[in-house]
Image: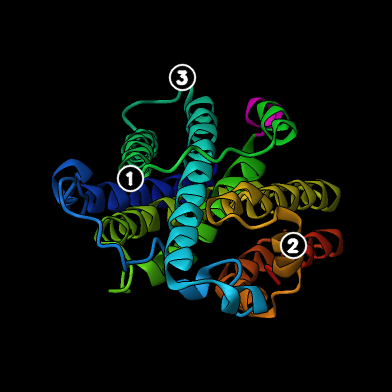
């Protein structure tokens, strides 16, 4: 191995070691951090109302305050259900990537630490949905089946790129939830936990992406860029299920039409995803076909 290669490996190990140290000093146990027996005040939202899919539309103005509260609780649980679904996918991809690698390496150990974090996050989300008495909102059957293929075949920058996109999108919205006193305490606290711990996961994913794209041909990078964009399109499209509108007795088609025309939400998404797009561009993973997909879900 060349001196450059050894130096690169050493830098990667140092980076993973710092993430491991961070996880040891700044991690949370949702079982003890969240007040699971606390009340659910009737006037508190499930998420910041500005992040509701209908906020800023005439339909939002038609809703009573109680309908708005109910809708946002179902919307946040839809996001959490989607989060659980994708966290299970990324755990399998990380395990496969680390299969039979040197367990003494800090990269290997942090990868397992991330999986442990994701397991706690999924249980945390599941318990919140249970406490709010909201049903599981899962992606469509087609998306679920396509995801089986993705989690089985995705490797390298595609696997970590899909992971990064999912984590970044949730991070964008939860940074607002955790600071908003209008939002239920269980959601505020879970958002804080998720934001703090996912920040390490996103750093890890970014480093893995940069490592894997090194030496890739232009054709390979374009192919990877397209696949990552497809994953982003599916995740963002699946984040809030159309079924949530049943909770307030609203016609799904009418609500979906309002969401498609909601310029407020589009603007929030574009602003929130600016950093992600900048990183993908620097990594050579923001091609014209990819940009076209990102624009369809208003990430750019």
Q: CA distance from mark 1 to mark 2?
A: 29 Å
Question: In this picture, which residue range is highlighted in magenta?
Answer: 149-154
For residue 254, the mark is 2
For residue 102, the mark is none
Left or right of 66, for residue 29 = left
Q: CA distance from mark 2 to mark 3?
A: 51 Å
Q: Is residue 14 magenta?
A: no
At a point 22% along the width and 45% down the height, the residue shown is 30
Which is more toward the observer, 300 or 190?
190
Left or right of 190, for residue 272 = right
10 Å neighbourhood of mark 3: few (<14), some, or many (≥20)?
few
Please tell me whether mark 3 sits on a helix, a strand or a loop: loop
- Provide residue 142's location: percent of width, then percent of height: 75, 32
Circle 1 sits on which residue? 128
Q: Nearer the viewer, mark 2 or mark 3?
A: 2
- Provide residue 209's location: percent of width, then percent of height: 59, 50
Q: Earlier in the sequence, mark 1 or mark 2?
A: 1
Where the N terminus falls, by quadrant? top right
- Provide residue 127's location: percent of width, then percent of height: 31, 39
Q: Residue furthest top?
A: 100
Which is more toward the observer, 105 or 115?
115
Residue 196 drawn above or below residue 113: below
10 Å neighbourhood of mark 2: few (<14), some, or many (≥20)?
few
Q: Earlier in the sequence, mark 3 or mark 1?
A: 3
Residue 108 drawn above or below residue 289: above
At a point 69% along the width and 56% down the height, the residue shown is 251
For residue 100, the mark is 3
Please tell me whether mark 2 sits on a helix, a strand or a loop: helix
Q: CA distance from mark 3 to mark 1?
A: 36 Å
Left or right of 148, for residue 295 = right
Magenta-colored segment: predominant secondary structure? helix
């Amino acid at each position: 191995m060349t001196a450059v290669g050894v130096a690169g490996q050493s830098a990667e190990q140092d980076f993973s070691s710092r993430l491991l140290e961070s996880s040891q000093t700044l991690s949370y146990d949702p079982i003890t951090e969240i007040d699971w027996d606390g009340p659910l005040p009737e006037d508190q939202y499930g998420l910041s109302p500005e992040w509701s899919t209908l906020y800023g539309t005439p339909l939002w103005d038609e809703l009573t305050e109680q309908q708005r509260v109910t809708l946002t609780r179902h919307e946040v649980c839809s996001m959490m259900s989607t989060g659980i679904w994708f966290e299970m996918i990324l755990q399998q991809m990380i395990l496969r990537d680390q299969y039979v690698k040197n367990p003494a390496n800090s990269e290997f150990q942090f990868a397992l630490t991330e999986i442990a974090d994701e397991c706690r996050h999924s249980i945390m989300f599941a318990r919140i949905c249970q406490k709010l008495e909201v049903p599981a909102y899962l992606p469509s059957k087609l998306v679920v089946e396509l995801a089986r293929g993705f989690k089985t075949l995705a490797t390298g920058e595609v696997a970590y790129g899909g992971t990064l996109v999912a984590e970044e999108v949730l991070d964008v919205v939860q940074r607002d939830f955790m600071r908003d006193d209008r939002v239920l305490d269980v959601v505020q606290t879970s958002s804080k936990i998720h934001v703090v711990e996912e920040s390490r996961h996103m750093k890890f994913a970014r480093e893995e992406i940069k490592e894997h794209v090194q030496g890739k041909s232009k054709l390979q990078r374009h192919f990877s860029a397209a696949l990552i964009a497809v994953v982003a399109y599916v995740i963002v499209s699946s984040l809030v299920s159309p079924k949530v509108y049943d909770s307030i007795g609203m016609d799904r088609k009418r609500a979906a039409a309002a969401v498609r025309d909601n310029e407020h939400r589009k603007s929030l998404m574009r602003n929130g995803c600016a950093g992600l797009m900048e990183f993908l561009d620097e990594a050579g993973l923001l091609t014209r076909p990819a940009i076209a997909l990102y624009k369809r879900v208003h990430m750019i």
